[in-house]
Image: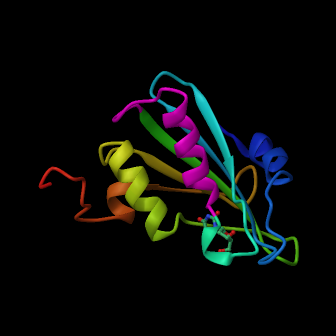
Amino acid sequence: MNYFHQLEGLLERSYAPYSGFNVAAIVVTKTGDIYKGVNVESAAYPTTICAERNALHTAVTEGVQIGDISEVHILARNATKILVKAYPCGACRQVIAEQAENDAQIYSYTSASEIEQHSISELLPFAFLGQAL
Ligand code: THU
């Protein structure tokens, strides 16, 4: 399914006054439920949260369990208001891999029709999923 129009609307809720880089993410579960997130920056810069983790944390808060997540859709816009392709940062890749049991597809949009797809295991090879803990 194509989430471009929903992501475009969601992008307006991103709070990124410091970087000007707006990101929207939609997490989709195997049963077709969706959870939304935007990046929320802070004047104390490191406390910023990415759109992807915001969506994932909301999904978990709403009851989504390990292995339920199947897709993450991402749209980003830079400070000059141009839509740009964004891949999840390293921290978000870790959280996606763990929550999706290393089995999810990541969709990076630059328009309604230009969508790059990668598996999470491609983006985060040799993931640390916690079995060794
Ligand atoms: N950001 C995300 O929300 N997701 C990404 O995939 C890359 C980075 C945010 C964090 C920060 O608010 C801004 O983009 C610039 O790094």
Q: Residue most toward the front?
A: 44
Q: Which quarter of the figure is the N terminus placed in?
A: top right
> At 34% across and 62% down in the image, what residue appears?
122
Measured along the vertical axis of the image, is residue 53 above or below residue 33? below
Q: Is residue 95 left or right of residue 32?
A: left
Q: Residue most toward the left?
A: 132
66 is within the stretch colored magenta: yes
Q: Whereabouts is ligand 1, in terms of quadrant?
A: bottom right
Measured along the vertical axis of the image, is residue 40 above or below residue 30? below
Q: Is residue 126 left or right of residue 24?
A: left
Residue 60 in the image: state x and y as whole percent.
48, 36
Q: Which quarter of the figure is the C terminus placed in?
A: bottom left
Q: Nearer the viewer, residue 47 or 86?
A: 47
Residue 89 in the image: state x and y as whole percent.
51, 69
Q: Is residue 123 left or right of residue 51?
A: left
> At 78% across and 74% down in the image, what residue appears?
78
Residue 13 in the image: state x and y as whole percent.
83, 51
User: Magenta span covers which residues?
Assistant: 49-68
Name the image quarter holding residue 33: top right
Measured along the vertical axis of the image, is residue 56 above or below residue 76? above
